[in-house]
Image: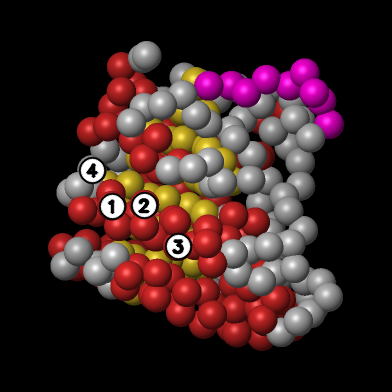
Amino acid sequence: MSGSRMAINFARRIVVKVGTSSITYANGRMNLGSINKLCRSIADLCNSGKEVILVTSGAIGVGVGCLNLQERPTEMREKQAVAAVGQCELMNAYSRSFAEYQYVCGQILLTKDDLTDKLTRSNITNTIEAMLERQLIPVINENDSVSTTEIMHNGTFGDNDTLSASVACLVNADLLIILSDIDGLYDGNPREDNNAKRISYVDEITDEMLGFSKGAGSKLGTGGMYTKVTAMQKVTSRGINGVIAQSSEPLVLEKILNQDDIGTFFAAQ
């Protein structure tokens, strides 16, 4: 096992990103079992002395399920309205689950402008630091009800993989864990190529890796493997280790911190 991968065990500040497909069913309804398992694992990490920040997708996806819609809206104003409903449901689920393990979480909604404006960026950092000092769990999501791709102001991150990388850099995290519906980066598309093999360790992200990671995300989500790899490219360049792993793997966070060979490890540069 490489020294870089062993460094995972010493990571104190960890950003965990979970995608829409990891916490919802195909119909958009919340997968409460998955949410509870995630919150239990995060609470246990906090019990061990780790600081954990959760970046979550799912506001629009959960809103779709809550409102019994047949599919994700395409019109921007409809997406934003659905996101407003879904975000409430999502935070209620996280709050209930964390409470079972004696932890309190707090919501932080961000737009791209928030991280580019110097004063606002400082305020966000101070809020997160204050929460961690009080052993609160920050739950961060993009503010889908006001973020748009059409206008410069309040622009969108595009996906929460990019947001999680930005947050990891903002708080000087030691480790970024992106939980997905695929168990890491493969040298091909495992959904189409039965011979595709999981890449266990990456010490440098190449153009070839970016090439074979391209592909769409889930029906209710916005990201794919490409956005996850580019997120890893961002954090590793800032000296932060990263892991992409499958959210449905039992005790996935515990296994990652135990340096088990699951997912794909990206070594900090």
Mark 1: amino acid: Asp
Q: Which residue is mark 1?
A: 44
Callout 3 amino acid: Asn
Which label sits on residue 12? 4
> Looking at this view, is 89 or 228 the one in front?
89
Left or right? Give the position of 23 relative to 126. Answer: right
Please tell me which of labels 2 and 3 falls first in the chain.
Answer: 3
* Residue type at tag 4: Arg
Q: Is residue 198 above or below residue 219?
A: above
Mark 2–mark 3 distance (CA, rounded to whole Å): 9 Å
Circle 4 or circle 1, nearest the eye: 1
Nearest to N terminus: mark 3 or mark 1: 3
Q: Quadrant of residue 156?
A: bottom right
Q: Quadrant of the C terminus?
A: top left
* Quadrant into which the N terminus falls: top left
Q: Say if mark 2 contacts mark 4, CB within 8 Å.
A: no
Q: Identify the residue at image location x=63%, y=63%.
A: 24
Is-magenta flag for residue 220? no
CA gap between label 3 and label 1 equals 12 Å
Coordinates of residue 158 in the picture (x, y in percent): 63, 58
**Whole-percent x, y for residue 145 in the image:** 59, 80
- Left or right of 82: which side holds 203? left
Give the label on residue 41, or none: 2
- Choose the circle earlier in sequence order: 2 or 4: 4
Can residue 209 be seen by looking at this rendering?
no
Q: Are discs 1 and 2 less than 8 Å apart at CB?
A: yes
Check if mark 4's residue and mark 1's residue have beta carbons within 8 Å: no
Please give the residue where the numbered disc 3 appears in the rendered image: 36
The label number, if any, that marks residue 185 in the structure image? none
Determine whether the residue tagged by mark 4 lies in a helix, strand or loop.
Answer: loop
Query: Of residues 48 and 88, which is closer to you in this image?
Result: 48
